[in-house]
């Protein structure tokens, strides 16, 4: 059973796979990485 604690905020595009404590903020932080292709 997965429980979201009281007064927690879950951002968009977040997959909850375990319980979240009360008064938590959970969000997805996107990163863009650039690396050259092998020639």
Image (cartoon, rainbow, N blue to C red):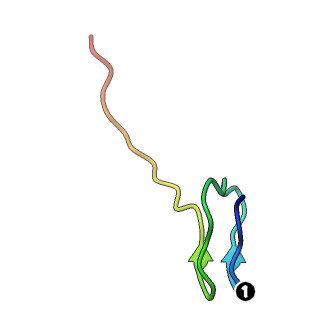
Where is residue 25? Give x, y as percent. 59, 79
Report the residue marked by disc 1: 6
Q: Secondary structure at mark 1?
A: loop
In the image, residue 36 above or below residue 31: above
Q: Residue furthest front?
A: 1
Left or right of residue 31: residue 27? right
Quadrant location of residue 9?
Answer: bottom right
Q: Residue at x 37, y 39 (%)?
A: 34
Placement of the N terminus among the 4 image quadrants: bottom right
Quadrant location of residue 8?
Answer: bottom right
Closest to the observer, 37 or 20: 20
Left or right of residue 11: residue 36? left
Where is residue 30? Give x, y as percent. 52, 56
Left or right of residue 17: residue 34? left
Left or right of residue 5: residue 26? left
In the image, residue 27 above or below residue 38: below
Label 1 Cα crowd, 10 Å radius (few <14 / some 14-19 / many 20+): few
Q: Residue at x 66, y 57 (%)?
A: 16
Closest to the observer, 35 or 8: 8
């Amino acid at each position: 059973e997965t429980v979201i604690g009281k007064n927690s905020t879950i951002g968009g595009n977040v997959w909850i796979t375990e319980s979240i404590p009360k008064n938590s903020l959970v969000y997805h932080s996107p990163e863009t990485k650039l690396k050259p292709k092998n020639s």
